[in-house]
Image (tube, helix red, strand yellow):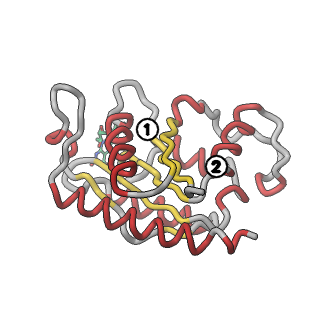
């Protein structure tokens, strides 16, 4: 049975380009990996700021929105988190979504695709990699930044990055596959 990859769109603001990056990442993952791929939009998950009374490790969720989000994360064998860079930092929506859960992340590999101006969101990416390691995920070093992302979005709203970025995605997906296969039995 195919391993499951969830690609999480981490930006939620009006006018965001997160879904454009998400569609591109989904297409590349479907073309260049054997994962069963699902694109998940945090805007649709619509999580409030941490509003559960119990520590997430207890998995005693009281709210339907947390239960829905926990079910998405629990169903995954691997993640790609998509984050914009806001003030050298990942989106608060993504940080919040990660901190709403705990055991659902356990021993799963995760890669990051980031975007922004000259940095391609690399400062945000590093922050997210630190957070996901603290959540007991395996953060891949094979991250994919998208520098000057707006230059690669056509009038049709489709992202077409240069070949080195696609090659980076291919390498990241290969690594993610290896880690997902290695860690699946480790979850018991
Ligand atoms: C509050 C805010 C802060 C930003 N800070 C940065 C930044 O630190 N580095 C950067 O490269 N771009 C920054 N940008 C520009 C974003 O990269 C750009 O708006 C991008 O479209 C954000 O992704 P989104 O459209 O999915 O929200 C910032 C944008 C906003 C709205």
Q: Say above or below: 36 vs 133.
A: above
Residue density around tag 1, few if under 14, some if 14–19, many if 20 or more, within 10 Å:
many
47 left or right, relative to 36: right
Question: Where residue 102 sits in the image (x, y, percent)?
Answer: 70, 57
- Asked whether mark 2 and ligand 1 are closer than 8 Å, the reply comes as no
Q: Does the residue tagged 1 have its C-beta within 8 Å of any atom of ligand 1?
A: yes
Q: Give the percent coordinates (x, y) of residue 126.
A: 41, 64
Mark 2 vs mark 1: give the one in front: 2
Q: Where is residue 70, by image quadrant?
A: top right
User: Foreground residue, 122 or 8?
Assistant: 8
- Residue 106 sits in quarter: bottom right
What is the spatial separation of the Cα atoms under label 2 and label 1, in whole angstroms? 17 Å
- Determine whether 155 is above or below 59 in the image: above
Instruction: Give the quadrant of the C terminus.
Output: bottom right
Picture quadrant of ligand 1: top left
Q: Name the residue that disc number 2 marks.
A: 73
Q: Residue at x 39, y 48 (%)?
A: 30
Left-right relation of 163 to 97: left
Q: Mark 2 or mark 1, which has the lower sequence index? A: 1
Whether residues under marks 2 and 1 lie with C-beta atoms below 8 angstroms apart, the answer is: no
Total count of labels = 2
Residue at image point 15% right, 52% down: 162
Q: Is residue 4 above or below residue 132?
A: above
Q: Is label 2 in a helix, a strand or a loop?
A: helix
Q: Which mark is residue 11?
A: 1
Query: Which residue is rendered at x = 39% and y = 62% of the image?
Result: 173
Residue at the farthest front position: 1
Q: Is residue 60 left or right of residue 20?
A: right
**Which disc is residue 107 wearing?**
none
Image quarter hosting the N terminus? bottom right
Residue 139, horizontal then vertical, whole percent: 49, 68
């Amino acid at each position: 049975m195919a391993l499951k990859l969830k690609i999480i769109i981490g930006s939620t603001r009006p006018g965001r380009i997160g879904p454009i990056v998400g569609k591109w990442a989904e297409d590349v993952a479907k073309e260049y990996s054997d994962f069963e791929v699902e694109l998940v939009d945090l805007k649709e998950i619509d999580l409030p700021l941490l509003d559960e009374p119990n520590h997430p490790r207890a998995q005693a969720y009281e709210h339907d929105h947390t239960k829905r989000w926990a079910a998405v994360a629990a169903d995954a064998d691997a993640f790609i988190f998509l984050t914009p860079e806001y003030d050298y930092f990942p989106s608060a929506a993504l940080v919040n979504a990660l901190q709403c859960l705990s055991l659902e992340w356990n021993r799963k590999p995760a890669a990051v695709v980031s975007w922004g101006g000259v940095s391609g969101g690399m400062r945000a990416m590093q922050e997210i990699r630190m957070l996901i390691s603290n959540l007991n995920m395996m953060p891949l070093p094979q991250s994919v930044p998208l520098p000057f992302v707006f230059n690669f979005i056509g009038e049709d709203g489709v992202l077409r990055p240069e070949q080195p970025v696609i090659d980076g995605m291919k390498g990241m997906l290969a690594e993610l596959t290896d880690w997902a296969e290695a860690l699946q039995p480790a979850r018991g």
